[in-house]
Image (cartoon, rainbow, N blue to C red):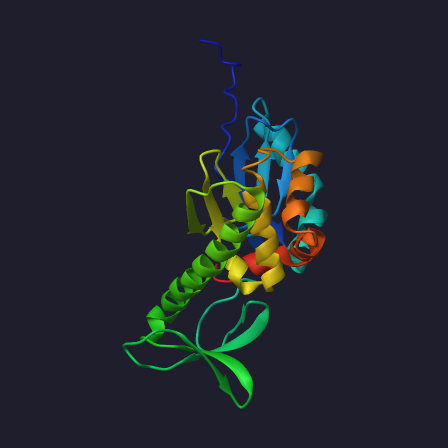
Amino acid sequence: MNLFFRAKPKIPASTTIDIDGAPVTVTVRVNARARSYRLSIPHSGGPLLTLPPHGKWAEAEAFLLRHHNWLAARIRRAPQATSFGDGGIVPLRGIDHRIIGTGKLRGRVEVAEDDGAPVLLVPGEAAHQARRLTDWLKDEAQADLSERTAIHAARLGVTVKSVRMRSQSSRWGSCSSSGNINYNWRLVLAPPFVLDYVAAHEVAHLVEMNHSAAFWATVKRTLPDMEKGRAWLKAHGRQLMAHGG
């Protein structure tokens, strides 16, 4: 037996780093397409350390430590997760609404006003209000996105097979070549022109399954003002993802 042999350190699923005196969990993932070590903070969830296929854990740890200050600064600026509890504020189609728990066991979420300010009246026990509000928002997103998807599909002459809501942590939508489109339900929280942009974007993939110049021309053909929604998502997308997390 070779007493000088050392086993290659196993790459863990996560590691911990101290940020401002508090432990922060960093998820560790090997990505077959990665060419180098990468540290990021996805729209939802904690920091992510990505390794290339042949990455070494010792090198990854050193990379993480070298980027300690960068990570600390990003975490301080990161949007705080918001809850859907009584008294919370949630945007609906770009307009902030205060959540009011009605205490009623039956009924649906209702949009109303309280002293002239928009509110969402949410029934159910306190422990279930967040779920009921989330389910209602998903239904609203389904209606809005189904409508805009149908409009853009008609303009571009394509057929959409299905429209479904998802809770992706880093994507606003996806489209398969067979015509199935998934959207992130949180789009209903944004101004309508943002939701419209994502719908146009995904439907355009049924014409061009790529992000070439031809694809962007297709998006612009069905939505000439596409840059407005694209710019809003770039500026506010991280905060939008924090809702309902």
Along the line of sight, the residue nearer the viewer: 121 or 37:
121
Quarter of the image that includes the N terminus: top left
Along the line of sight, the residue nearer the viewer: 224 or 7:
224
Q: Position of residue 242 (x, y in %)?
A: 55, 59
Asked whether, in this view, residue 49 is left or right of residue 88, the answer is: right
Q: Position of residue 131 (x, y in %)?
A: 37, 65
Q: Residue furthest top?
A: 1
Q: Position of residue 32 (x, y in %)?
A: 55, 26
Q: Position of residue 125 (x, y in %)?
A: 31, 75
Q: Is residue 23 above or below residue 61?
A: below
> Which residue is pictured at 58% across the width and 60% down the height?
240
Along the line of sight, the residue nearer the viewer: 36 or 26:
36
Is residue 171 at least partly visible in the picture? Answer: no
Q: Is residue 222 above or below residue 131?
A: above
> Which residue is pictured at 49% across the width and 80% down the height?
119
Asked whether, in this view, residue 34 is left or right of residue 109, the answer is: right
Classify residue 26 by image quadrant. top right
Tally of numbered tags: 0
Q: Is residue 185 above or below residue 90?
A: above
Asked whether, in this view, residue 47 is left or right of residue 176, the answer is: right
Is residue 163 at least partly visible in the picture? Answer: yes
Q: Residue furthest left?
A: 105
